[in-house]
């Protein structure tokens, strides 16, 4: 109760922008959960093959990678409020194109526009949140934003799991129409998240100095190349499998859409629970060891999903794998930033975002093709190998820092 009271006290002290961003997150996150469970299944119901599905996922990631640095440049010129409003507009139009026309080229255009909008959103949201509270209230604002996002996303998981078949049955129509209805309704609700953003107070953005940006990168080129390689290996591995887990569990493992919605929601909760222990683990054995240990520990569970695809075993492995692989993600992000000089961090962050999205795009294109060819065990095996390689390279490349908390 004392913790809840402190959150309430800090909430009352948040700046106007902080409260508006929380309101936008509350309204705008529902479609994130519904799309993560239902969208690929919707496309499969429309008759789109898994290999073409991979190209759709990849196109969005490529667009996000290509837009990352231009979005940062634009933020310095037109401001963060303008960027997040343009991001909202791009996401709204992209979402409409992805679900309404039911034509492959329109869906592809929507994926590209949505990918660009998502990275514009990411570029603007963190600095806006950082300016939404004082130094004491900032951790509470970021934590509340994360908790709201996860809770509403969980609701979206459940709606996309149970809603399409129930809606199709109630209307006496096909399952793809049920998916369309649920995705459309959740998208409209999420679109309301734009309204609080209209009232944000503009905050100044630091001017972009290209010469300083380039010199900062060159001064950290050895460390940067190591980080980009490790980050890209993880992104390729993730792209091979993660976008297709809903299709895999429904079409290969045999779960219903409703059961996968529950599983995805439970996965959010287990990841949230284990992530809270990440800093404590890093304090005991060092951040680098904590990252490597948790990532390597997730690999047997990843392989279990592929080679023991029974509903109970694969579902249990899904929960454990996601929690272990992601529990040290904040530590990994912090470690990446600590590995470079402070004046290099904005430039490094931009390049890491580009690297992740381009590598994810390549992985998802290959993953869709493998799934479509019935080679899911190869798909999961490649991801396991890439995760293992990235984790070992991280431990070896930064061996001198492995005992640093």
Image (cartoon, rainbow, N blue to C red):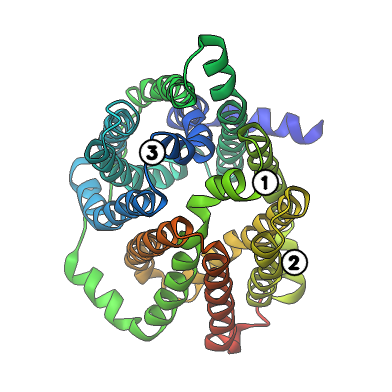
Instruction: Tell me the quarter of the image containing the C terminus.
Output: bottom right
Instruction: Tell me the quarter of the image containing the N terminus.
Output: top right
Query: How far across and down, in percent of the image, does residue 154 sit?
Result: 62, 34
Q: Is residue 386 left or right of residue 77?
A: right
Gap in Å between the C-alphas at discs 3 and 1?
28 Å
Query: How far across and down, in percent of the image, does residue 210 sit?
Result: 18, 66
User: Does 156 appear above or below 314?
Assistant: above
Local secondary structure at mark 1: helix
Residue position marked by numbered label 1 in the rendering: 267
Q: Is residue 216 left or right of residue 325?
A: left
Q: Earlier in the sequence, mark 1 or mark 2?
A: 1
Gap in Å between the C-alphas at discs 1 and 2?
20 Å
Question: In percent of the image, x 43 and y 41: which residue is there?
Answer: 131
Question: In percent of the image, x 29 and y 75: which residue is there?
Answer: 216
Give the crowd class for mark 1: few <14, some 14-19, many >=20 residues within 10 Å: many
Question: In percent of the image, x 35 and y 81: which residue is there?
Answer: 220
User: Does 132 appear above or below 169?
Assistant: below
Local secondary structure at mark 3: loop
User: Does 80 appear above or below 178?
Assistant: below
Q: Tell which of 355 and 371 is nearer to you.
A: 371
Query: Which of the numbered marks, if any, corresponds to residue 281?
Result: 2
Residue position marked by numbered label 3 in the rendering: 47
């Amino acid at each position: 109760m004392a913790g809840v009271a402190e959150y309430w006290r800090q909430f009352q002290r948040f700046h106007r922008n902080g409260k508006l961003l929380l309101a936008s997150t509350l309204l705008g996150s529902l479609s994130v959960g519904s799309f993560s469970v239902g969208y690929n299944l919707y496309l499969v119901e429309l008759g789109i093959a898994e290999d073409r599905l991979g190209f759709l996922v990849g196109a969005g990631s490529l667009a996000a990678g290509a837009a990352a640095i231009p979005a940062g440049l634009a933020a310095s010129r037109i401001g963060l409020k303008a960027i997040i409003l343009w991001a909202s507009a791009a996401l709204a139009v992209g979402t409409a194109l992805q679900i309404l026309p039911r034509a492959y080229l329109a869906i592809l255009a929507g994926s590209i526009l949505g990918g660009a909008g998502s990275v514009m959103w990411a570029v603007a949201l963190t600095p806006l949140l950082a300016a939404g509270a004082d130094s004491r209230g900032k951790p509470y604002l970021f934590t509340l934003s994360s908790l709201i996002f996860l809770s509403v996303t969980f609701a979206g998981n459940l709606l996309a799991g149970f809603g399409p078949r129930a809606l199709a049955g109630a209307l006496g129509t096909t399952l793809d129409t049920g998916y369309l209805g649920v995705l459309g309704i959740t998208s409209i609700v999420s679109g309301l998240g734009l309204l609080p953003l209209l009232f944000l107070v503009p905050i100044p953005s630091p001017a972009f100095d290209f010469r300083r940006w380039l010199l900062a990168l060159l001064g950290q080129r050895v460390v940067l190349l190591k980080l980009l390689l490790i980050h890209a290996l993880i992104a390729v591995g993730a792209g091979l499998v993660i976008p297709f887990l809903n299709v895999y569990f429904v079409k290969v493992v045999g779960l219903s859409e409703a059961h996968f919605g529950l599983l995805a929601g439970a996965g959010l909760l287990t990841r949230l629970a284990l992530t809270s222990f990440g800093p404590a683990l890093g304090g005991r054995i060092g951040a680098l060891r904590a990252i490597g240990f948790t990532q390597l520990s997730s690999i047997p569970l990843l392989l279990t999903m592929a080679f023991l695809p029974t509903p109970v075993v694969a579902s249990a492995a899904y929960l454990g794998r996601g929690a272990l692989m992601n529990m040290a993600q904040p530590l990994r992000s912090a470690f990446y930033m600590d590995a470079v000089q402070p004046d290099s961090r904005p430039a490094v962050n931009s390049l890491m975002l580009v690297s992740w999205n381009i590598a994810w795009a390549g992985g998802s294109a290959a993953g869709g093709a493998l799934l479509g060819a019935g080679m899911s065990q190869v798909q999961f095996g490649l991801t396991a190998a890439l995760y293992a390689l990235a984790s070992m390279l991280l431990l070896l490349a930064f061996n001198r820092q492995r005992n640093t908390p």
